[in-house]
Amino acid sequence: MNRSESRIAARIYFLERELERMSCAADNAEDELRARPMDAAAVRRLEALYTLADETWERIQALRARLSGGPSVIYFNRRHAEPAAKAWRQALV
């Protein structure tokens, strides 16, 4: 994997983690909407989360398509999970 592919893989990893966080937030928003089905703010919040998740998934798919050859498998790299790497990952997006 060359340097460019490594950066793409790091971006995919970051976006997939963000997608997981959005999933948790969407679960909470769905619970809130079930508790108060007439709450317009809860509906808008959930719609916004779904829209953002769709856009994030599309970005992930586009980045995977840019990877040259081989399967689109992302291996866990503990270095990218450390808090010190957070600013570096955010700069890639």
Image (cartoon, helix red, strand yellow):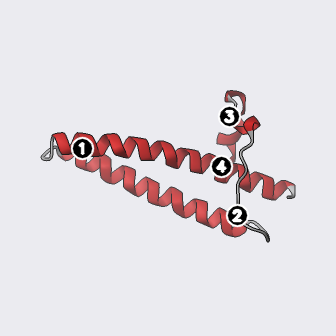
Instruction: Point out the frontmost of discs 4 and 3.
Output: 4
At 43% from the left edge and 47% from the top edge, which residue is drawn? 23
At 50% from the left edge and 46% from the top edge, which residue is drawn? 20
Instruction: Point out the frontmost of discs 3 and 2.
Output: 2
- Where is mark 4, residue-wise? 13
Residue type, mark 2 in image: Ser
* Picture quadrant where residue 88 is located: top right
Sort mark 1 into few (<14), some (14-19) or many (20+) by Cα contacts within 10 Å.
Answer: some
Quarter of the rendering occupied by the N terminus: bottom right
- Where is mark 1, residue-wise? 42
Q: Which mark is residue 4?
A: none
- Where is mark 3, residue-wise? 87
Q: Which mark is residue 72?
A: 2
Sort mark 3 into few (<14), some (14-19) or many (20+) by Cα contacts within 10 Å.
Answer: few
Residue type, mark 1 in image: Ala
Q: Is residue 57 left or right of residue 82?
A: left
Query: Which mark sits nearer the N-terminus, 2 or 4?
Result: 4
